[in-house]
Image: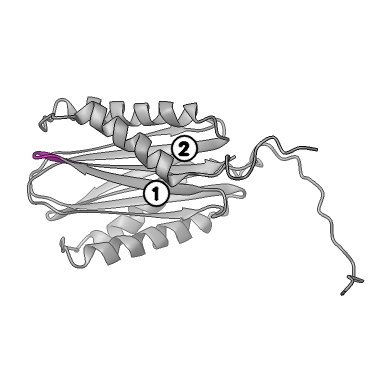
Amino acid sequence: MDSFTGELKVYENTYQTLPLPGKKFNPEAVNKIIQSTLHARLQKTKYSAKESPQLIQSLCSELQKAIQALDYDRYKIIVQVTVGEMLGQGCFFGSRGLWDTQTDSFATYTFQNGSLYCVATAFAFFTP
Amino acid sequence: MEDLQSSEEAAFVVEDVTNIIKEAIEVTLQQAAYHHSKVGQWTSNVVEQCLRRLTALNKPFKYIVTCIIMQKNGAGLHTASSCYWDNASDGSCSYRWENKTMYCITSVFGCMI
């Protein structure tokens, strides 16, 4: 039977129950990121049933990376992107969250051009 | 020291949540036909009913419920999501429902506290 002879690191609790000042999720900053990303990627895009799934998957990962780059510690981030064809149909998006209003929030932006519309939302949960 | 909650009880159970979503949609939309003035109310009802029942499960989770109601017109719709969380404890599920005049897609994301 092997025995461990090296140094064992034990991390103490940080007892952090709120985000550090300056590290709280900022919906406005994330809104701007979503806005600029959608405009850059979709300005000249036409709706295509074949290409849309790949397009939104890559949009999702791009937005996720951009939000990670803002370095919000201890936040769990959920990004949801929806793309639909503009054919005059009625559509309604709604969402509710059960969370801690002090620390958690969301950011959203809707983009549309002649042939498609895109709604991107980012939700952030703080994990103490 | 005894564990007050086993890891199974506190996990995100996709089946239970899918049933909750299904029942909330069926109760609200039943045999309704798409009407632009009622969509807002329907979406709120579906989402709030889901949240109420999710809370009643009494699990240490934070939830997001999103609902999309779209009129049937031949138009296409695609949804995707990307989640940065702990795979062992957190989860999501989605349910698609339709009738003759509309589609309803509801998603629930749950993150353990």
The answer to whether the residue labelled 1 contacts the one labelled 2, judged by CB atoms less than 8 Å apart, is no
Res. B95 image quadrant: top left
* A121 vs B59, nearest the viewer: B59
Q: Position of residue A56 (x, y in %)?
A: 30, 60
What residue did someone put label 2 on? B63
Which quadrant, please, contains the N terminus of chain B?
Answer: top right
Estimate the x, y position of residue A36 in percent, counting from the top left: 35, 55
Q: Residue furthest right?
A: A5
Residue A128 horizontal side relative to residue A61, left or right:
right
What residue do we see at 36% from left, 50% from top? Answer: A80
Position of residue A107 relative to residue A113, above or below, is above
Q: Which residues are magenta?
A: B99-103
Q: Is A24 placed above or below A35 here?
A: above
Label 2 is placed on what type of residue?
Tyr
Q: Nearer the viewer, residue A48 or B20?
A: B20
Residue B94 horizontal side relative to residue A23, left or right: left
Provide the residue designation for mark 1. A32
SS under mark 1: helix
